[in-house]
Amino acid sequence: MKDRKCYFGYPMRHHTIAVLPFKNHSSDPDHEYFADGMTEEIINALAELKGLRVTSRTSSFHFRDARVSIVDIAKKLGVQIILEGSIRVAGNSIRISAQLIEAREDYHFWSQSWDRKMDHIFEVQDEISLLIAEKIREQFGHFEIGEQLIDKQTDSLDAYHLSLKARFHFNRWNPADVKQSITWWEQALSFDPNHLESLVGLADAYGFLATTELIPREEGWGKALELTNRVLKIDPEHAGAWYQLANLSFFTEFDYQSSLEHTRKAIQLKPNYAEALQFLSFLYTISGNLEKASRYLNVALEIDPMSPETLFFRAYYLYRSGKYDQALRQIDVCLENNPNNIPAYVVRSYCLLKTGQSDEALKYLETIPLEFIPPDEKLGIECLAHLMKNKSKGNKLLENLIQRAEDPAAFQAHSYLWLAYGVLGNNDKAYTWLARTIEMKSSILLLSFTDPLVEKLREDSRFPRYQKQLYPQGQKPTTGKSKKGPGWEREKIEQNLQFLMQFIEEEQPYLSPNLTLRSLAEQIQMHPNQLSWLLNTKVGKNFNE
């Protein structure tokens, strides 16, 4: 089948689709947040389907208002199918239009419009998502579809709309908009205290502010933990909550193994979870397992190829792989697309240090806006650069770093002191300090222990022991054996196939212009998933063929 071969030069292991941002055709331009929300709900619903690879929101929204042909968009995203649509809101009424496009030939093989009341927004989202999934399966081949793809989020439309507004701001990934998103999510929770998407979004926002040190770490992560626990109490299988737990385990508990297991759980619940795939790649990267890191990074790149975050993780992987010049070029692309990417500034400095450009690193350090680099981060990079070129000045900065590292909460200083001892090749001081930081559960050390800047420390006999202690891999959770086919015995398969072919020959259902896979399944009293499997596996054709 064509989806198993190559498409625009990409090897296709799944059916692939990108959902472009629905256009806001309402008279009020402020309804753009609602159009975005509808798009995201459809993306999330389709992403639940195994066998369907759905481009992440970030990459799909990259083409908002872009003057690029559908064929070119599909090439850039590596997908077979494009879904585009529009929304018009008038009072309590909404009109939604959607169309599916086979990208390589650029032809529309399905389109439909719906006129509904806002009160039934979740029902219409589910109706649209199910119908889209059905049409993709009819056109391209078998995958399993459940009876429902979207659950009703809340009984409060006010909470839903405020949550959409919050997500609209949060997705801009800058401090001002993230703080605005917190305001909207808190208002949403005043209408519905158990609205899961608002609780997870709020946890994500506080985690962002804590990671970037825009608010005190304890305050930010404390609120994120409280909100995440509220979600899991309501829904223990919420993928977003497990991803939050992964971040909390890493950044607050110094627990690599739990972080790894929680990330795997999030991906098990939501296979197209780009952020969790990025994070899993990152976890394997810092542990030194570059083969696994590359595998998960490539999946994240398939799902979210235009995302600045995915491209940053690729740059970080290149840095950790010793490909410093390539990493520098990728980092520059990241910063061009998103000048607010705080970690990119740091990794760029590391690349300059590893390529012997200490002076350039110092000059670059002065160009980084102060709000994008915490004081201990700046002190640490400056110390490393001078230790590499001017030992006397470097030693003075090292004394300052040692003083700062005495603060149990100064995680950045703890990490840079390890790096500084590594640059100096002072193994005994380095490993003595390492033991202290482990006692303090200084989480940033998990990033720095295997950093290329401590290459000299890797040769020490103590390194493998600590590496095993810091990065236990744990056991991959078992998900059970996947059931192949619809669970029929071989004899039953042949009987059903014979009955199907006889029905088609005698009743000629294909003469009806309104025939669908689901309506044919109803006529022969067979589940649509079973019929789809039978057609693809035993007849060797998809429904439309």
Image (cartoon, helix red, strand yellow):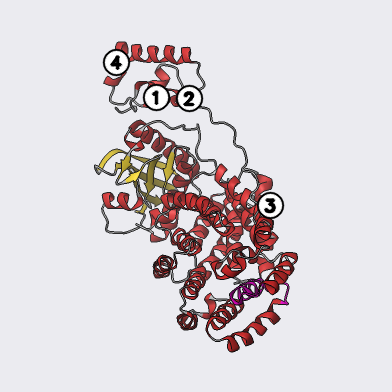
Give coordinates of residue 240: x percent, y percent. Answer: 58, 50
Task: List the residue tagged with mark 2.
Answer: 485
Amino acid carrying mark 2 in the image: Gly
Ranked by sequence position, the earlier of labels 4 and 2 is 2
The residue nearer to you, when weighing 474 against 37, is: 474
Ranked by sequence position, the earlier of labels 1 and 4 is 4
Q: Secondary structure at mark 3?
A: helix
Other-residue count near label 1 (Cα within 10 Å), few / some / many at <14 / 14–19 / ≥20: some
Ranked by sequence position, the earlier of labels 4 and 3 is 3
Up-down: is 366 above or below 349? below
Report the disc number at residue 508: 4
The reply to whether residue 195 is in sight is no
Residue 143, image quadrant: top left
Residue 227, image quadrant: bottom right
- Name the front one of labels 1 and 4: 1
The residue nearer to you, when weighing 262 against 83, is: 262
Report the disc number at residue 399: none
Report the disc number at residue 229: 3
Q: Which residues lie in the magenta part?
A: 406-426
